[in-house]
Amino acid sequence: MKKNPFFTEEHEEIRSVLRKFVAKEVTPHIDEWEEQGEFPLSVMRRMGELGFLGLRYPTEVGGQGGDYFMSLIVAEELARCGAGGFPMAVAVQMEMATPPIMEFGTEDQKERFLIPAIRGEKLAALGITEPNHGSDVASIQTRAVRDGDEWVINGNKTFITNGPRADFVLLVTRTAPGSGYKGITLFLVETDRPGFFVSRKLDKVGMRSSDTAELILENVRVPQANLLGVEGKGFYHIMWELQGERLIGAAGAVGMASHAYELALDYAKTRRTFGKAIGQHQVIGHLLAQMATRIEAARQLTYSTAYRFARGEVPAKLISMAKLEASRTACWVADRALQIFGGSGYMSENVVQRIWRDVRLYRIGAGTDEIMKEIIAKEMGL
Ligand SMILES: Cc1cc2nc3c(=O)[nH]c(=O)nc-3n(C[C@H](O)[C@H](O)[C@H](O)COP(=O)(O)OP(=O)(O)OC[C@H]3O[C@@H](n4cnc5c(N)ncnc54)[C@H](O)[C@@H]3O)c2cc1C
């Protein structure tokens, strides 16, 4: 019987290649990258060379022509490195900052931004959040004003993943003041333009192998050719982007939860107390059963939603449900996994404590739990 009806043999082959790559070229170095607070850019280039960054992109833009399930496999397999940071950086590169270029970009924009990102030669970031506006995307204030054939951009962005070293940022700006979600426009902004500054590299609780920045834009000039999509339609474009971002977040959360569960299961089979393996104490055995059940439920919701997304539907309610449930499951599972390890789970040398810290972000990034519930409730007619 096939392992899972959503995956073909080709998917499983790619999964096995990725698993070997992660075991050989990511996991052995992840402690060092976590310590340094960033991953080396060479590993992004390596993933580009091996074709992993373009698995679901068409061959015309240097991709491998696979489907959306390839992206889920990347998210799940990278999670096996035992940290969320580097996988998040890859997800920003391929599933957040670049899909809008494929969807709304010109040939020239694909040439200048998408193709080098797929090759791993240019690092991409997504700039939505501002110091005063996170969940309320329609209120963002970073201002872009037209000046002849150019646009002049001023504003601040914060919590920007890949921000400290990005080569370009897909930036959400306001081009019409006072018109709410109707006055928003997207730009592709090269970070070497005069007036673009990384004001701070931010220190974080977890996701430490991913670097995060606060950005300042002071009279940054970009040509009209860098406007992405349609002027004034940026809110719709970014809401489209957020659907994919949430779904890949759900896949990452499921991957991290599975990894924590597998570690706890192995430990429960070998660690002995009161004359038997701790998994033989019914309370621990049942807890592991419940962990596996919740992970499977979140996984199947993610897969079945992805099945529709891969066919061009944008099932916003299901995507929000998958993101909400997978994130909460990951936090719940990681906490129980740490408990199963007892004191050793609390030691820095144990991967499970890192997963426990890292998964907390899933309930905040790409739209918080509360925003997911808002969307679900609205879709229910409330
Ligand atoms: C490590 C990290 C990486 C990130 N990477 C990026 C990135 O690459 N690019 C980017 O643009 N952003 C990024 N973010 C930002 C992230 O998307 C935001 O933090 C998130 O959307 C929440 O926004 P906020 O922090 O401004 O919180 P706020 O919007 O201020 O919300 C604060 C609290 O109020 C709640 N709340 C807000 N509105 C409502 C409501 N209507 N009903 C009920 N409760 C509500 C929220 O759920 C939350 O609990 C990142 C954040 C982190 C921590």
Image (tube, rainbow, N blue to C red):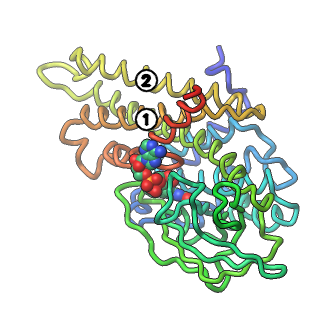
Distance Cα–Cα, label 2 vs label 1? 10 Å
Tell me where residue 213 appears, x and y as whole percent.
Answer: 49, 69
- For the C terminus, which image quadrant? top right
- The residue carrying mark 1 is 257
The correct choice, above or below, for 252 with respect to 39 in the image is above
Which of the 4 image quadrants contains residue 89?
bottom right
- The residue carrying mark 2 is 294
In the orientation shown, which residue stands out farthest toward the bottom?
A: 194
Count the marks.
2
Q: Nearer the viewer, residue 191 or 364?
A: 364
Report if the CB atoms under discs 2 and 1 are less than 8 Å apart.
yes
Three-letter amino acid code at disc 1? Ala
Residue displayed at 68% across by 73% down: 144
Which of the 4 image quadrants contains residue 331?
top left
In front: mark 2 or mark 1? 2
Disc 1 on helix, strand or loop?
helix
The correct choice, above or below, for 251 with respect to 228 in the image is above
Tell me where residue 376 appears, x and y as whole percent.
Answer: 55, 31
